[in-house]
Image (cartoon, rainbow, N blue to C red):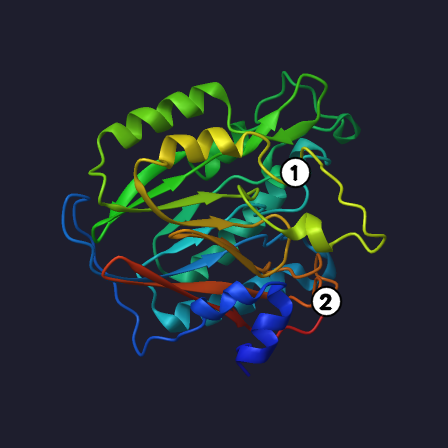
Amino acid sequence: MNTAIDRRGFLKCSGIAALAIAIARPDTLIGGERDTGSKPGDLDFVFFTDTHIQPELRADEGCRKCFRQIAELHPAFAICGGDLVFDAAAVPRKRAGQLFDLYQQAEDLLGVPIYHTIGNHDVVGVFSRSGVSPTEPGYGKQMFEQRIGHSYYSFNRNGYHFIVLDSIFLTGDREWEARIDPGQLQWLAQDLAGIDRQTPIIAVSHVPLATSFNSYQAPDGKVRQKPTLVVTNAFEVLALLAPYRLIAVLQGHIHINEVVSYGEIQFITSGAVCGNWWRGPRWNSPEGFSVISLRSGTLIHRYETYGWKA
């Protein structure tokens, strides 16, 4: 049976009361597409993230159940926030390919256009323990780009401009950090140069650009700054976007429900399809996805569960 978080439960799992502005539910889902120069209209789509598909823990079954529920909403399209698979970075290349096969077969159930974001578990063989050589085909982001698409890009829908960022920066020591690289920053500046400054913009990043997670995730009260938890040069990204009308950033990675509001911007971190890596809820955030409703330039957000039992 399909379920949705009620108002009290939704605010409880968010961690901050600012989520109260984001729980209204529209009566219908609206699709459509126009050029970015047109007046922003009405549009509904789904943002899901951190599917972490794998043969183990019934993850494939869980993803399919989630995708069937999304399909029943008939959204205009879906955006995947990254970490499609678990864990291409740490397994042999053959296993990584099998994981991507599993994901692509499952997402066919959605039946709508899908825009993908790259996550840290989607890069092949980056960790030495994978046994994958950097010279092997598919290494790093190659398999994602060959099988899924570009790691960063933009598109327009119904008078809104969407920017999908690649927040996974591979370091020289076969590790990674959350960073938007210089080439991508240059591309972003060029992309924005062609946008009317009154056009509502929605950015997407696997790793959050802004989150309060660090403030309450440490039971000992010590705030830990990790280069893989928040985009380390988020200030550079937001400085480029500052002259424009950024209304939301859709984020994943930390598997919790949270909205941080700053001015007109909502930094919406969605709970994960996989919850706590297919072992139940994560920090009171059950397995689920976000429905985003746009109404004449205003964004409304709600979180839905899909009745999964780990």
In what element is the residue under mark 2?
loop
Question: Residue 230, image x and y in percent?
Answer: 61, 39
Q: Residue at x 76, y 41 (%)?
A: 224
Other residues around mark 2 within 10 Å, as few (<14) / some (14–19) / many (≥20): some
Q: Mark 1 points at which residue?
A: 88
Q: Where is residue 172 in the image (x, y as percent from the top left)?
A: 67, 16
The residue lying at 73 percent from left, 29 percent from top is 127
Q: Which of 165 and 52 is in front in this view?
A: 165
116 with respect to 57 (left or right): left
Position of residue 230 relative to residue 160, above or below, is above
Query: SS of the residue at dot 1?
Result: loop
Q: Quadrant of the C terminus?
A: bottom right
Q: Is residue 171 found left or right of 221 in the rendered image?
A: left
Figure disc tally: 2
Q: What residue type is labelled 2?
A: Gly
Seen as rendered, the residue at the extreme front is: 263
Disc 2 versus disc 1: nearer the observer: 2
Is 153 displayed left or right of 250 in the figure? left
Q: Residues within 10 Å of mark 1 (few under 14, many from 20)?
A: many
Asked if residue 150 is positioned above or below residue 84 in the image, the reply reads above
Q: Residue at x 23, y 36 (%)?
A: 195
Give the quarter of the figure containing the N terminus.
bottom right
Vertically, is 256 above or below 150? Answer: below
Q: Nearer the viewer, residue 248 or 34?
A: 248
Distance of mark 2 from mark 1, alpha carbons?
A: 22 Å
| Residue 3 shows in this picture | no
| Residues marked 2 and 1 touching at CB (< 8 Å) | no
Residue 190 % position (x, y): 30, 24
Mark 2 or mark 1, earlier in chain: 1
Outermost left residue = 38
- Residue 280 numbered mark, or none: 2
Disc 1 residue type (three-letter): Ala
